[in-house]
Image (tube, rainbow, N blue to C red):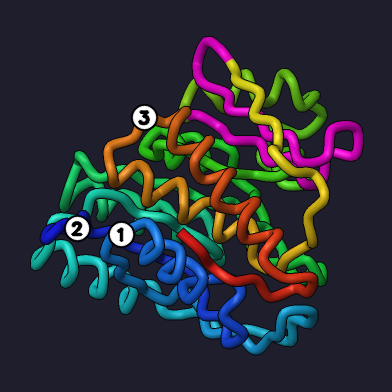
């Protein structure tokens, strides 16, 4: 049994159902045998099938929490979830990189809940590029990627623009032509990640689980492709674990 686990941090919302947000992230971290910290960007009122409202955490409080943890521990990787603005995200990312330049950052680009509650509207493409330049991976689905790329740009051309700044794992859950097939795009190539089992059940928080599983694998010093493959396999097991919206976590 390992005596020293790498430290990993989730900066995301608190979901009282435990299906998404920091609770889901820390469950995932534990199954990967990394030690998970968590900082809330928002408290939410929701269940696995209904989103009511949220209360954002003041940025200064989040930044002080980050600084406190980084001063005490060497944090190998950070997963970021819901945030209210690009300025909020930029402050978080720049602080992490100032405190620990070698720490990897994964941003799960959650722009709205499955019940159509908007978390973030992207209004400044320049700030987005500044942020992506400091990030190791973003994990949008097909609905989200269309909002991250410049207006009027095709998804293919938009991906080419974004990968100049950071790699993209384009999740296949909303791709009706190839459901469940993910694509990892790097600067000069892409990888097709097919599901091992397509007969799965939909789950609340599956995107959170995938991004936190990838983050854990990065902290365990897996390369990006292996981390994405391992994260996908873990998430498929999560999706298969129950026939309802709340899944179980297994190593």
Mark 1: which secondary structure?
A: loop
Q: Which residue is tagged 3?
A: 223
Q: Which residue is tagged 2?
A: 5
Q: Quadrant of the N terminus?
A: bottom left
Mark 2 crowdedness (10 Å alpha carbons): few <14, some 14-19, many ≥20? some
Q: Residue reaching furthest right?
A: 177
For residue 169: magenta?
A: yes
| In the rendered image, the vertical position of residue 37 relative to residue 176, given as above or below | below
Q: Nearer the viewer, residue 52 or 26?
A: 26
Image quadrant in which you'd find residue 142: top right
Which x, y percent locates residue 189?
56, 12
Q: Nearer the viewer, residue 109 or 237?
A: 237
Q: Nearer the viewer, mark 1 or mark 3?
A: 1
Could you tell me how far apart the alpha carbons at marks 1 and 3 are, in whole angstroms? 17 Å
Q: Nearer the viewer, residue 153 or 196?
A: 196
Q: Residue at x 36, y 29 (%)?
A: 223
The answer to whether residue 221 is left or right of residue 248 is: left
Q: Are marks 2 and 1 in contact (CB under 8 Å)?
A: yes
Could you tell me how far apart the alpha carbons at marks 2 and 3 are, in whole angstroms? 18 Å
Q: Which residue is tagged 1?
A: 33
| In the rendered image, the vertical position of residue 50 relative to residue 131, given as above or below | below
- The magenta segment is 167-189
| In the rendered image, the vertical position of residue 109 relative to residue 30, given as above or below | above
Q: Residue at x 64, y 29 (%)?
A: 193
Mark 3: which secondary structure?
A: loop
Image quadrant in which you'd find residue 39: bottom left
Badge 2 or badge 1: first in the primary sequence = 2
Badge 2 or badge 3: first in the primary sequence = 2
Q: Residue at x 81, y 71 (%)?
A: 115
Badge 1 or badge 3: first in the primary sequence = 1
Q: Residue reaching furthest front?
A: 1
């Amino acid at each position: 049994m390992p005596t020293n686990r790498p430290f990993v941090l989730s900066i995301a919302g608190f979901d009282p159902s435990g299906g998404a947000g920091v609770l889901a992230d820390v469950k995932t971290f534990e199954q990967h045998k990394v030690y998970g910290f968590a900082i809330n960007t928002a408290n939410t009122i929701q269940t696995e099938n209904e989103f009511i409202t949220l209360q954002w955490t003041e940025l200064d409080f989040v930044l002080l929490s980050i600084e406190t943890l980084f001063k005490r521990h060497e944090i190998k990787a950070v997963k970021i979830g819901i945030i209210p603005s690009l300025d909020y995200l930029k402050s978080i990312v720049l602080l992490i990189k100032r405190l620990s330049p070698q720490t990897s950052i994964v941003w799960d680009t959650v722009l709205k809940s499955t019940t159509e509650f908007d978390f973030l509207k992207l209004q400044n493409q320049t700030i987005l590029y500044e942020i992506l330049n400091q990030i190791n991976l973003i994990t949008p689905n097909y609905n989200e990627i269309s909002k991250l790329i410049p207006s009027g740009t095709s998804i293919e051309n938009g991906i080419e623009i974004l990968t100049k700044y950071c790699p993209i794992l384009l999740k296949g859950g909303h791709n009706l032509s190839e459901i469940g097939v993910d694509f990892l795009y790097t600067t000069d190539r892409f990888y097709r990640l097919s599901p091992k089992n397509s007969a799965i059940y939909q789950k609340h928080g599956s995107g959170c689980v995938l991004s936190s599983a990838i983050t854990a694998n990065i902290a365990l010093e897996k390369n990006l492709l292996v981390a994405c493959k391992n994260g996908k396999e873990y998430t498929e097991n999560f999706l298969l674990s129950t026939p309802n919206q709340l899944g179980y976590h297994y190593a």
